[in-house]
Image: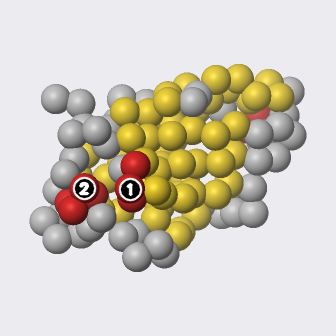
Amino acid sequence: QVHLVESGGGVAQAGGSLRISCKAPRTILSVYWQKTMGWYRQAPGSQREMVATITSSGITNYAESVKGRFTISRDNGKKTVYLQLNSAKPEDTAVYFCHSLDESTMSEDWGQGTQVTVSS
């Protein structure tokens, strides 16, 4: 079963913007509210790293490399989390994975990833 579905990946020019989304179509709305949602990325030959997270109460956390450029947000009614990439850099090129963590049960899920490519 696919619990998290990413969309919006593609190609952006350096300095440009892109928004990626992650929807949880199978998650009950009341359960979605209690999840920390996050975005991670993995570039070729590199380990997966945290990009940004947002808790059920809206507290955000960012990797130093994206602070001031990326914004994570969530729309609980749509069971969707977004990542706005601004001032994109070629080093942002990676597969971006959506992640959910249930704050009560600590169960987690991963999306299948969406490719983001920033050309110089």
Quarter-wise, where is residue 24 in the image? Answer: top left
Q: Residues within 10 Å of mark 2 (few under 14, many from 20)?
A: some
Q: Is residue 40 left or right of residue 28?
A: right
Relative vertical location of residue 77 with respect to residue 98 in this rendering, above or below: below
Q: Identify the element where label 2 is drawn.
A: helix
Relative vertical location of residue 7 with respect to residue 51 in this rendering, above or below: above
Q: Is residue 24 left or right of residue 54?
A: left
Q: Identify the element where label 1 is drawn.
A: helix
Image point 47% across, 72% down: which residue? 58
Ranked by sequence position, the earlier of labels 2 and 1 is: 2
Label 2, label 1: how far apart the Cα atoms are? 7 Å
In front: 23, or 95?
23
Say which mark, if any, is on residue 105: none
Spot the residue most to the front. 77
Percent position of residue 89, x then y: 78, 40
Q: Quadrant of the C terminus?
A: top right
Residue that badge 1 annotates: 77
Q: Is residue 94 left or right of residue 56?
A: right
In front: 77, or 120?
77
Q: Residues within 10 Å of mark 1 (few under 14, many from 20)?
A: few
Residue that badge 2 annotates: 29
Image point 23% across, 30% down: which residue? 2
The reply to whether callout 2 and callout 1 are in contact (CB within 8 Å) is yes
Percent position of residue 96, x then y: 51, 37
